[in-house]
Amino acid sequence: MTAEGSAQSRAPATAQALSQKRAAPPVPPSLAKFLSLNDFEVAAKRHLPKMLHGYMAGGVETDWSLEDNRRAFAEYGFIPRVLVDARARHTRMSLFGKEYAAPFGIPPMGSSALLAYRGDLVLTEAAKARNIPMIMSASSLIKLEEIAKANPDAWYQAYLPGEPSRIEPLVDRVIAAGFKTFVLTVDVQVSSNRENNIRNGYSIPLKPSFKLFWQGATHPQWSFGTWFRTLKNHGMPYFENMDAGRGPPILSRELERAFGARDGLSWPHLELIRRRFPGKVLIKGVLHPDDVVRAKEIGVDGVMVSNHGGRQLDGAVSGLRMLPEIVKVAGGMPVIYDGGVRRGTDVLKAYALGASFVFVGRPMLCAAAVRGQPGVERAIDLLQEEINRDLALIGANTIPEIGPEFLTKV
């Protein structure tokens, strides 16, 4: 466990625990059928056109890394303790000095507003309402200034080329918007080989075709509830946050330049960002312990261990397998895990292996797509309730109590 986590109380005041366990408001009938994160993923597959669902849910090439994110969790089993008084348990967890109601957050997900109406705003407002962290994506279709206004505690995530002339103005824009945490994604040197996108008819830029039209026509709830509603109220979506200025629209051939030159991004550019950004700086997409050591030497405040949801290098190992080694070399620097989380038990396994915090992506976007902000809040509540229940079954009251002694390889 991190020093920050171990400093938290192992047995919170009974009054605090009881306040968390007060009866939750009744679940609206439209959300009552959703009993797990998987239920939102199943509903999203029906709701979204095949090309969009494939873009969101798919991996790359053989899907080896996508599947390894789930395999890694299945290779650990719990060794619970019994006869532990767990009436004072709670799910609160702190990160960078801020206490959150649940020990997980929502990571950056590109083009969210194409899958869910005003998707990035829906996600960040749900996170604010439930007091969990949320990271907006550089490939968002909603201006970063709007996200910062809706949720001043949101984080910004960047995809950057190796060009200081583009890096510096963007960093300054993020500072001016009021973001206090800057996340640099470091595992997107080039576009990955997502064959499933080609087969399903999805591309960036979007290319009008009969297949595209037919998929929209056969999914009218998405077409009218998201696509035409967006066009009517906000016009053609643009990639608003790739650079200091507005990026191209999603139909533009200029998108190649906006996404290009990332293979030139290197350590000196991270040093530049560290010098220029006054708040917290993290890097996302780290798997090798040596990279964590170098990042710490540069002065980053934390790392996100991830294989990009299995969407970049097929064959990249699950970050869960690398957590213990990375935590060891991080020396107390927060190590955040992201990848394949679907259950409260997954969250607790990541913490048992040393994670300082956990992020949960695709299911939250599915919830936004099918039920908007209430859906995301329901998804957050379900996962938090699972964690609360699992703490009692494992024999613990707080997240920092969970360590490797609660796990065994199976």
Image: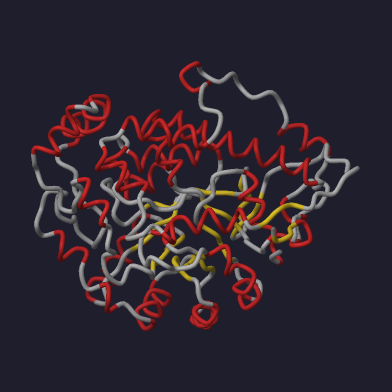
Q: Position of residue 323 (x, y in %)?
A: 60, 67
Residue pictured at 71% horizontal, 64% vertical: 1
On screen, 274 above or below 216? below
Q: Is residue 19 above or below residue 134?
A: above
Residue 281 appears in the picture as rendered: no
Residue 281 point in image, percent of width and height: 46, 68
User: Residue 203 in the image: x percent, y percent?
Assistant: 18, 52
> Residue 182 vs residue 139: left or right?
right
The image quarter containing residue 192 is bottom left
Q: Is residue 184 above or below residue 362?
A: below
Q: Residue at x 78, y 32 (%)?
A: 18
Q: Is residue 83 visible?
A: yes
Residue drawn at x 37%, y 34% as measured from the top left: 44
Image position, residue 247 (x, y; %): 18, 56
State left or right for residue 316 relative to residue 23: left
User: Looking at the picture, does residue 41 appear above or below residue 242?
Assistant: above
Q: Nearer the viewer, residue 311 or 128?
A: 311
**332 relative position to 167: left or right:** right
The residue that appears at 9% across and 43% down in the rendered structure is: 208
Figure quadrant of the C terminus: bottom right
Q: In which quarter of the view is residue 171 placed?
A: bottom left
